[in-house]
Amino acid sequence: MSSIMYAFQSYKLTAPNDIGFNGIENFKAVLTDNNFPLIMKNTLIWVVVTVGAQFVLGLILALALSRPFPLRNIYQAVVFLPWAVSSFVIGLTFRWLFNTEYGPINDILLKLGIIHEKIYFLSDPRMALYSVIIAMAWTGIPFFAIMLLAAMQSIPHEIYEAAEMDGAGMISRFWNVTFSYIKQTILITLLLRTIWVFSSAELIYIMTTGGPANSSNTLASYMFMKAFASLDYGQAAAIGLFFMVLLLLFTFVYLRLTKFEKAGNL
Amino acid sequence: MNLRMIGLVAISTALLVTTACSSSGGNGGSGKKIEISFTDVAPSPEREKFFNEIIAEFEKENTNIKVNLETVPWDQAFAKLTTQGQSKTLPDVVNVYPAWLTTFVPAGYLEPISTQYDEWDKKDNLTAFVKNVTIEQQQREPFKDVYLIPDAFMGGALFIRTDWMKEANLELPKTWDELFNVAEKLTDPSQNRYGFSYRGARAGFDQILAYIFSVTKGESYEADGTSVLLRPEALTAFKRYTDIYKKGWAPKDSINWGYQEMVQGFTSGVTGILAQTTEVVATAKASMKDGTWTVIPNPAALDGNTYGGAGASWGYSISKNSKNKEAAWKFIEFLSKPENNNKYSKVMTMIPIMQDSLKDPEIGQGPMKGFIDMLNDPKLIPPADYGKFPELGEFRESLMDAEVQKYLLGTQSAEDTMKHLGDFLTKAQQKFMKDHPDIPVPHAANYKG
């Protein structure tokens, strides 16, 4: 409630004597901001690529782990580790890994002869956002894997046996049995992750502070910086409100398009 | 399930209530010890050790006062203190960055300490710079009162690789032109060597401004509040300075560099020149071979003066909401005692505030000499600041570096960059002047004069 109130006020902690109602000024300031189109584009790339990569890699991981093999439990514990590490540590680690001058990734790639010139992961405006996406995707793979693996393990074995007896191949078995059974889990996990990634700003803040020149800023990190760097709670709240409307709209369209309530009925 | 939930809620409520009670009852009643809190905004193991020792000595001398040391990391300090100020929960004694006064004083977060300062018996031992610039020009003139006693000084100076200079047969630069020349000559990408530790992010614009001051004679505004960034010579200076990056005398990665990366670039042997403050001396000493580097004063402008240099690192202030202002001042007085201030300055490799301290041989020798020579140079003119308007935080945190980065990346012209920055400052400063006609436009000072 109070953040909705802030959105219609001039509420800068740096100017506490000027706090007061200012109508739609905050929204105007946000929407007419020169950086706004770039930030919206970044947000779209950020969400689609991150969630897409997390889903595909998480699904592959879940499929790999769904069959028993020696030391599976230990392996499972190790691959789920990123989920337990704080984003602050992840951000700092990736910032160091990607450092062009003394980070190990460039060094290894150069020594292996894969690249011949250094890659400017965090300082090249075309690379910065994708570099953060790599870190973000990495942290989210286990979440998908855990959810999908749990769903896969609940599929009765007899169904696979029956399908095999009917002569279904590997792809057919995956599509008609596995996928159908876990479809609802996929849909809910995708929705949850989209909302999550959309609102996540920590890694961007730690790795690039949105730079260079806003090339890696998303709506969430921009809001974060308005609130905690510029201390402009009014504008931050306005972005937040805009943000909420976008998410509600997305959720509504998503549930409609995927016919979610029917997804579980085989 | 429900019962368990109810139990959980009950326990957490009980816990919350007890915590709230215990924190509100902390400030002691009559006959009890007075407790004051002190927040340091740049915590490090060395600082914590120093403050704990000082507090122990202080408590021994003042048995009725107990000091609680709290810390907040530098990156979050401004936001946290502003929030505390707003909710009237600032600690009794707080370390304040001088530039924050423009936010904290008008908002009424800090207690004026002019009377205590004027009656202070150590006042006359303060160096001319502290008395005339930090206290009079930067506080009493704009704010009509004194709000902080500086802890020590961080002078800006140039760290330079003398071994590279010798190899290239170059002389130490004394002027800006010589500095740019040296930066170019030291650059050799094939050896992964670059002339300059360029600061492209997180307060990078401050470094560009240091050069712009050399053509505006340390001024940041015209008399009517128009930013000097709109002057044609400032634009030329901006292009000249950013050429360091554009022409490749700095690593391409440095567009993303802040303090930590610049220092690492220099100490790890990637860059040959680093414009930084005193506290880097300790890092350089620890990670570089003796005789491969030195510290020299900042380059002089065409008129022979040096614009830039020194500022108080932080200062001790008393918060308005403090209930123990007398004890708080006592603690500040104790911290500022010449022997304690000397000890502090040595631990932090900074310049002390008292005249007598500059005679201390341990402080006045080695790489620190470069800084002290600069502070004692009669041609040093501390430039004007950005101003006292509340939009300063927004300018520094989200506008200035992003605008410069657009130029460095070639997506915006230098003219547009300077116009955007200049217009923002002009608008904010002129609005501020209208609201506060009694506060003068920031100006450069010759503190010796």
Image (spheres, rainbow, N blue to C red):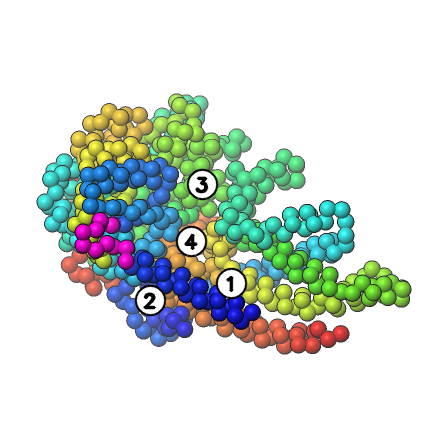
Pointer 2: what residue?
A: A11
Chain containing mark 3: B
Q: CA distance from mark 1 to mark 4?
A: 22 Å
Q: Amino acid at mark 3?
A: Glu
Depth check, front residue: A158 or B402: A158
The image shows residue B446 at horizontal and vertical percentages of 18, 41
Using residue B274 as the reference point, say whether residue A166 is left or right of it.
right
Task: Give the amino acid type for the residue marked by disc 4 in the picture.
Answer: Ala
Q: On residue A199, which mark appears?
A: 1
- Disc 3: CA contacts within 10 A as few (<14), some (14-19) or many (>=20): some
Residue B261: mark: 3
| Res B402 label | 4
Asked if badges 4 and 2 are on one and the same chain, I answer: no
At numbered mark 2, what does the secondary structure look like: helix, strand or loop?
Answer: loop
Q: Quadrant of residue B267?
A: top left
Q: What range of the chain is rendered magenta?
A: B25-36
Which residue is located at x 77 percent, y 54 percent? Answer: A67
Same chain under badges 2 and 1? The reply is: yes
Between A6 and B434, the one lying in front of the other is: A6
Residue type at the position of mark 1: Ser
